[in-house]
Image (cartoon, helix red, strand yellow):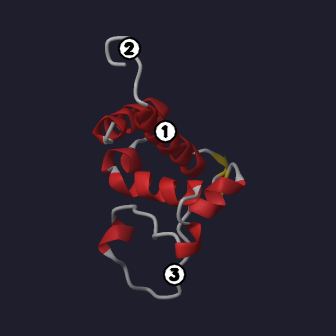
Amino acid sequence: MEEAGFESVNRTIVYSIAMECWRALNYRDTSDGPLNPLGDILSPSPSSSDRSTRSAASGCLPPPTKYQMDTFTWWAHTCWNASPLLRSAPTVSAAMKAAKKLAMEAPI
């Protein structure tokens, strides 16, 4: 596949999920809301406590519930939390580079 210039299915899926997650969390209709409902699902919910955790401070999303395993939401959380570059990407092109780097780290 590499000789033909194609990526593996796994890497293509990781890249696609990472980019969809970035778009859902970064494209906004207004200054206070996501563009689509997927952003609401992936966005961290407001905490009832004032405590801050290291993962929240680094922009990680809380893990999905056990009922969300093997769904797009679970994989989006996994990709988002696995890439600090993706979380800090300010533009689409920076997010694309971060998603590509993350995809290249995925097993074939």
Instruction: For marks 2 and 1, give the CA distance.
Output: 16 Å
**Residue wearing tag 1:** 13
Q: Is residue 42 left or right of residue 4?
A: right
> Which of pointers 3 and 2 lies earlier in the amino acid sequence?
2
Quarter occupied by residue 6: top left
Q: Residue furthest bottom?
A: 49
SS of the residue under disc 3: loop
Graded by Cα atoms within 10 Å as few (under 14), some (14 to 19) or many (20 or more), the crowding at tag 2 reads few
- Label 3, label 2: how far apart the Cα atoms are: 45 Å
Q: Position of residue 24 (x, y in %)?
A: 59, 48
Compute the Cα span from label 3 to label 1.
Answer: 31 Å
Residue type at mark 3 is: Ser
Q: Nearer the viewer, residue 31 or 20?
A: 20
Element on which disc 1 rests: helix
Q: Which residue is mark 2?
A: 5
| Residue located beneath label 3 in the image | 47
Residue shown at 34% from the left, 54% from the top: 82
SS category of the residue bearing label 2: loop
Classify residue 32 as left or right of residue 1: right
Which residue is farthest top?
4
Q: Residue at x 30, y 72 (%)?
A: 54
**Mark in the foreground, 3 or 2:** 2
From this view, report whether residue 54 is shown above or below residue 27: below
Residue that appears at 34% across and 49% down: 83
Image location of residue 51, percent across then percent down? 39, 85
In the image, 15 versus 106, the foreground residue is 106
What amino acid does circle 1 point to? Ile
